[in-house]
Amino acid sequence: MNKKYDVIIIGGGVTGCFIARELSRYDLNIALVEKEPDVCTGTSKANTALIHAGFNADSNKLKGRLNVRGNKLYHERVQHELDVPIEWLGAMVVAEDEADIPKLEAILANGQKNDVPDLEIVKGDRLYELEPHLSEDAVAALYAPTAGIVNPFELTVALANNAARNGVDVFLEAEVEDIEDKGDHKLVKTVKGEMEAGLVINAAGLYADKIANMVGIDKFKITPRRGEYYLYDKKMELNLQKTIFPVPTEVSKGIVVTPTDERNVLIGPNAEEIDNVENKSTTRKGLDKVMEGANKTVPGLSKKGIIREFVGLRPAIKETGDFLIEASDEVSGFINVAGIQSPGLASSPAIAEMVVGIVKEELGDLNEKSDFDPNYQGPPKFRHMTHAEQAKLVEENPDYGQIICRCETVTKGEILDIIREPVGARTVNAVKRRARPGAGRCQGGFCEPKVVSILAEELGIEENEVCLESAKSKLLKEKTKAPLLKEVAK
Amino acid sequence: MNNQNYELVVVGGGPAGLAAAQEAYDQGIRDILIIERDFELGGILQQCIHNGFGLHYFGEELTGPEYAHQFIKNIRERGIDIKLDTMVLEVTPDKKVFAINSDEGMIEIDAGAVILAMGCRERTREAIDIPGSRPAGVYSAGTAQRYINMEQWIPGEKVVILGSGDIGLIMARRMHLEGAEVEAVLELLPFSGGLTRNIVQCLEDFDIPLRMQQTVVEIKGQDRLESVVVAEVDDNFKPIKGTEYEIECDTLLLSVGLIPENELSEEAGVEMSSITGGPIVNEGRETNIEGIFACGNVLHVHDLVDWVTEESLIAGKTAADYLKGGIAKRSKAIDVNPGENVGYIVPHKITNKVDDRKLVNLYMRAKQPMADVKINLYAGDKKLLDKKARRVEPGEMITFPVPEKMISSNDISSLKVDIVKEEK
């Protein structure tokens, strides 16, 4: 562990990784520390995967400003620089009652105030031209063509790898246990050892208040807001064109129905405040609410074809309902980037841009590196290729001829590629996030043992040291016969 | 692209594909290729190291690998071509097969006929919608079986098994024999979907409790599974409030049903049955696409491999007949329909005219267990035949032989089978 850095970023979610990547443009010594064995394991991995247009967020809040700016940066830069699935499908907020039309108009006005481009209210046949699967009860919709979908796993991983290639040291399984303020620098004590930096950026998501507390900041509290989701088999015959929202109520934005980048249908989330940041359990009640809500805008959805249910926790600062992005006025050299709930994913490029500005204020003007490379190219995606392209790929490398996951058509070559990247996969879920084995209808029934054995071989560990997600989530206990031999020995 | 030609391509080298290929060879077809995705032939039989296979077909009790070996030996002796570690990516309606492996790369095969024998996959936690956390330690029973019997790793120490189908029962015993504590086998239904002999030999002989009409309603655990919450269910399978109790365990095995793996079939345009999850076939196991056949668990989920073999021999023979110059058709097809207490019948229709045929076997499953029954076969309203049975179980497939002479008349356009209580 290189002990001295200019900047230490705590948290390997999309926010932390984006900040790391943006700061890696400059002549700075940067470390990113993450407590889990992979980046993208908290809020960033379990959300609706949307690049919101920005019509919802309050224009008086940071959220309102940064969402629209973030969306613009995705359009102008991110989608060109990073090899990550981003598509501009557009979103519709659908009213099913004439009485809700004024609410649509209010959202339209708010969106226009936020400078969201090309918003319009659509009615009649145009509704079904845009999205044929809408409920017959739809009377009008606010249509936002600049809304998009993104693969948040690939985005976060791309950012982490791009940052690493541009010189950022990424430390995984390096949970921060304490931070000591040493005046001109901070000593960050992780389970992997100590490191110091003049500037610490707290992007710890659900744990941001805990990290802030370590330097004596207690001005904000993170309240986890639980959202539950169902994900459908991509084989389901529902060829959704748009991201569909209901008209929001006082309490909630409502249940979204959206295609993902791989054309699974995703429905959710509900919203429930909970007190335990570790509680990622779905509930019967919550899931039923999700199903009921989704059916209001897109009727006919049932439990048939569901391949996954999951929970996302949004790290909200309840008291302000806004992001908190600032250099602390209590502790010098400490920047909080907290409360990044929805629309955090959409805002993340703008959050990073804003944080770079704050860093410049803290450290003075930064020198741009001449060799900074903003581009990231991920491994090939066999499943999206024509047979001729696939044939060519296998000729170049026979590992692409070995299919590990049949449901998603993932090759051994792709799995080896993503394990061997700078911020490579080390767990079964990390492999799944990057290359998709186990993300299909059999949920790893056939491929999981193969992925476990590839990981063990590549990492030089035993199969029973391979984890599902966290460092304690080991999949296998011991060799067969071992318990019996122990008994015999007794 | 590597272009090849075969008269017959068999997709899948498990028991279905092996028997079908063997029979096609024995019927005179020489240019046959079996494509298998795993590193060896035999399919799931290779991880079924318990005995109980082959009592019907071989007249002796074999283990899974032994059963497979009989056919693998036969395939080798016949010199039938095999591609291992090879995945079929696509079968087109005009019988082009795209497959890939590391040695040959992408292979495009022009096939005269195709036999689909891809088997099935297991239903998952999501398919039965169990809420809770997502820790390590939740496996489908077949995956756990692969870990133990093929990879030689024990997945856990304290086990709950949901589902008393055969794989669940077999895995209860297997985990027990590996030193794990099997806390309970839970079954949603009031009856087990497994073979009676497995309930006795896998649970009763080892004092493993089988709890009927109970299911897992929540999964708990942060990193590794810590416990499951179990509840009793009512007759509509809804959990009954107040009956919940918790079982500490580090492993949950799910044996909650099998689904035929028909992605290739569907993309090829094969017409599917929503009840079996497999293709709709005639008595020769030919699908709606001429020259594309299906057999084994890809067609419908079997309880005994012996029946898979029997069915696959039929598919192999018909594929050979097709390749040798076509199959004569009846002037009118017979639709075969399930009646009272019959879940489904395979074949779905009888369309072929075969001169030397003595009988056509109908394979069916009862919906509900029933004792002292009569199985009746009707042509329209007219009863053709009946057969008594002491007991029918949904878990045990019923074979009903129909003499050819009874259906040879072209007047018959539909058959129906029902299972009713025998009147005494």
Image (cartoon, coloured by chain):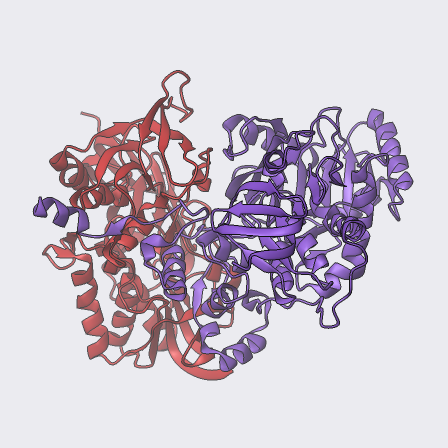
Chain colours: A purple, B red
Asked if residue A29 is positioned above or below residue A178 in the image, the reply reads: below
Q: Position of residue B192 (x, y in %)?
A: 26, 34
**Between residues A335 and A142, which one lies in front from this camera angle?**
A335
Q: Is residue A320 left or right of residue B75?
A: right
Q: Is residue B104 left or right of residue B406?
A: right
Q: Is residue B361 left or right of residue B37?
A: left
Asked if residue B77 is positioned above or below residue B126 in the image, the reply reads: below
Q: Position of residue B122 (x, y in %)?
A: 37, 48
Res B201 quadrant in image: top left
Asked if residue B135 is positioned above or below residue B92 in the image, the reply reads: above
Q: Position of residue B391 (x, y in %)?
A: 20, 34
Q: How many marks?
A: 0
Q: Quadrant of the C terminus of chain A?
A: top left
Q: Residue at x 26, y 75 (%)?
A: B27
Q: Is residue A202 left or right of residue B264?
A: right
Res B232 quadrant in image: top left
Q: Position of residue A204 (x, y in %)?
A: 61, 42
Q: Is residue A482 visible?
A: yes
**Between residues A152 and A390, which one lies in front from this camera angle?**
A152
**Between residues B421 and A323, which one lies in front from this camera angle?**
A323
View extreme (top): residue: B242
Q: Is residue B310 visible?
A: no
